[in-house]
Image (cartoon, helix red, strand yellow):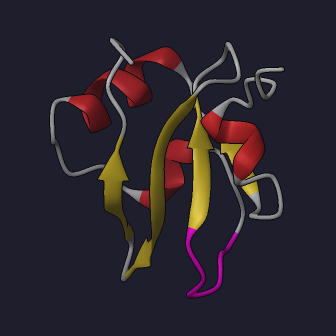
Amino acid sequence: EPLPFIADADVLGHVAAIVVAPDVARALEQGKVVPWSALGAGPAGAAPMRLLREDGSLLAMASLEGERVKTHRVFGLGR
């Protein structure tokens, strides 16, 4: 019997998450520098966080670096 499909956002469910606005998601997908304040989230620690699109799909793993979002990995739309 095949194993059930688990979405990547759910596999990393133990990691804190922030849902980002579509314009911020687009900027991150394009590799642009985004200030942390654009996420609409409060202060963050050094630990990586999941950034989710509005539909709940995984956009990126990122952390706070200075005042900007430091992406560790950005996940494309065509997965």
Bounds of the magenta segment: 43-48
What number of labels is visible? 0
The residue positioned farthest toward the left in the image shown: 31
Q: Is residue 53 above or below residue 74?
A: above
Q: Is residue 50 left or right of residue 23?
A: right
For residue 25: magenta?
Answer: no
Q: Is residue 33 above or below residue 3?
A: below
Q: Decide which of 26, 42 is in the foreground and name it.
A: 26
Q: Is residue 4 above or below residue 63?
A: above
Where residue 22 sits in the image (x, y, percent)? 48, 16
Q: Decide which of 16, 27 is in the foreground and name it.
A: 16
The residue located at (36%, 56%) in the rendering is: 35
Q: Is residue 31 left or right of residue 55?
A: left
Which image quadrant for residue 30? Answer: top left
The residue positioned farthest toward the bottom in the image shown: 46
For residue 44: magenta?
Answer: yes
Q: Is residue 28 left or right of residue 11?
A: left
Where residue 74 sits in the image (x, y, percent)? 33, 44
Q: Decide which of 40, 54 is in the foreground and name it.
A: 54
Which quarter of the rendered picture does the C terminus lie within?
Answer: top left
Where residue 12 sits in the image (x, y, percent)? 70, 54
Which image quadrant for residue 6? Answer: top right
Which image quadrant for residue 47? Answer: bottom right
The residue located at (55%, 72%) in the rendering is: 48
The secondary structure that dominates the magenta segment is loop
Q: Is residue 19 visible?
A: no
Q: Is residue 19 above or below residue 42?
A: above
The residue located at (32%, 22%) in the rendering is: 26
The residue located at (20%, 51%) in the rendering is: 33
Q: Is residue 40 visible?
A: yes
Which quarter of the rendered picture does the N terminus lie within?
Answer: top right
Where residue 59 sits in the image (x, y, percent)? 47, 35
